[in-house]
Amino acid sequence: MAAIDFINQVKALGFETQEPSSDKVCFEYTVEVGSNKGKKVLLGFENLNDFPMNAPHGPHFKPIDAGWTNPSGGVHASNFGSGWVHWSRPFKEWNRTKRTVKEYLAHIRNLLMAV
């Protein structure tokens, strides 16, 4: 298990992955809730070698559509490159879930609902 499991689960959910480097994966995601609803973004994750034991650290976002809104705090520069931001949002309840990408994306939806 590890990054390949994360990638395979993402693909099983119908997303097409990109791997900008050996420790990063991203995919296009359409926001379903919140002030960014309907906007497309690249959603990125890194250092997945201990997935599913541990959740990804926090999501990286690169807006595709104009008018993207970030939360007011906990947003940092991303090592994914230009145009990317990192939201420092740990998934504290990870150990109480089935530890799947589907569960993690539910966490992302909850984060986006608050923006």
Image: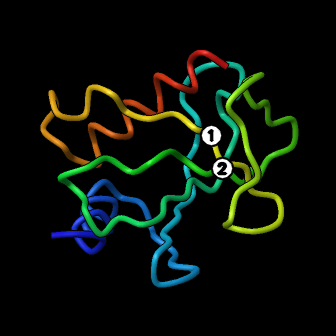
Would you say 33 lies left or right of 50 here? right
Residue found 20% across the figure and 54% down from its top: 52
Percent coordinates x, y for residue 59 in the rendering: 54, 47
Q: In the image as oriented, which residue stretches furthest toward the right? A: 66
Pick the front one: 4 or 11: 4
Percent coordinates x, y for residue 90 in the rendering: 44, 35
Between tags 2 and 1, which lies in front?
Answer: 1
Kind of residue at badge 2: Phe
When the figure is inspected, residue 7 is found, relative to residue 83, above or below; the finding is: below
- Residue denoted by label 2: 61
Mark 2 crowdedness (10 Å alpha carbons): few <14, some 14-19, many ≥20: many
Residue found 15% across the figure and 70% down from its top: 1
Of the numbered discs 2 and 1, the one sitting upstream in the chain is 2
When the figure is inspected, residue 62 is found, relative to residue 6, above or below; the finding is: above
Total marks shown come to: 2
Would you say 92 lies left or right of 58 here? left
When the figure is inspected, residue 19 is found, relative to residue 25, above or below; the finding is: below
